[in-house]
Amino acid sequence: MPLLELKNVTKYYDKGTPAISDISFVANEGEFISVIGPSGAGKSTILRCINRMIEASSGEIIFDSQDILKCNKRNIRAVRTKIGMIFQQYNLVERMSVIENVLHGRLGHKSTLAGIAGSYTDEEKKYAFKIIDMLGLTDQVYKRCDQLSGGQKQRVGIARALVQKPKIILCDEPISSLDPNSSKIIMDYLKSISSEMKITLIVNLHQVEISLKYSDRIIGVNSGKIVFDGPAKDMTSENIHNVYNIDNENSNFDLGEKYEA
């Protein structure tokens, strides 16, 4: 059984062209999947449908043997504790410290009152410190997040997702705001989370060469539809041309060339 399966998922924001149309794929435990495609292709919509940040118009999303599109509010809250999310712009509380932001990842496991009170168990705190240390942030643990670099902020975002003890992490353009060195650090951490912790990752990326380097599998999306789904090793220049609507005859692009959409 795959951990996640999308079946013919479609999303309309209005009555016009769908943002995504008949999206179907599976994701297995510990798999690192990159979703690539031009801006506006529907990559972010796919991720947000998976955790129901937005509601799909039709289709099925089976996660951990449960159709999450049929979940009520209480059930979807429980499902989201197993789904971590990493954002392009970090989505941190900047005035709070690293440890406070990381512990926010436990809020889905708590009652509303306990969440408001910021009441965490010793076990939760120990695990948060362990994750912070794993991500090389021990020296920053009590710093406010507005004092951190972009790469450090994204590592806090990763730690916040990991402290949930999720089965899957959805990453929406996690390196698009970072310099090349910070991007490599973040991607290395994400790869180790997938391979060593056996957590499934679905990562939206603009950078083709990075998706080729780190992914087990690549899903190419164009105009709301999947136009490629296969192992990274099977991605060809022709496939990339199709994903990005590049004219084969007039393009010198090959797989050794850096490319950003």
Image (cartoon, grey):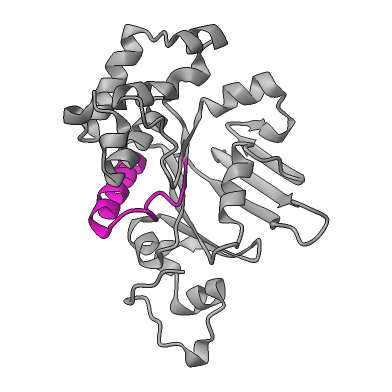
Q: Is 179 in the magenta?
A: yes
Query: Could you say where residue 180 lies in the image, as x and y percent from the top left?
Result: 27, 59
The residue under the point 54% across, 67% down is 38
The residue under the point 74% across, 58% down is 18
Residue 67, placed above or below residue 219:
above
Observer-nearest of 95 and 248: 95
Q: Is 114 in the magenta?
A: no
Residue 26, placed above or below residue 94:
below
Would you say 105 lies left or right of 69 here? left
Would you say 18 lies left or right of 124 here? right
Instruction: Identify the residue at the far bottom of this view.
Output: 249
Residue 164 sits in quarter: top left
The residue under the point 30% across, 23% down is 99
Query: Could you say where residue 92 lies in the image, as x and y percent from the top left?
Result: 41, 33
The residue under the point 28% across, 57% down is 179
Query: Could you say where residue 162 lies in the image, as x and y percent from the top left?
Result: 38, 30
Q: Which residues are magenta?
A: 170-196
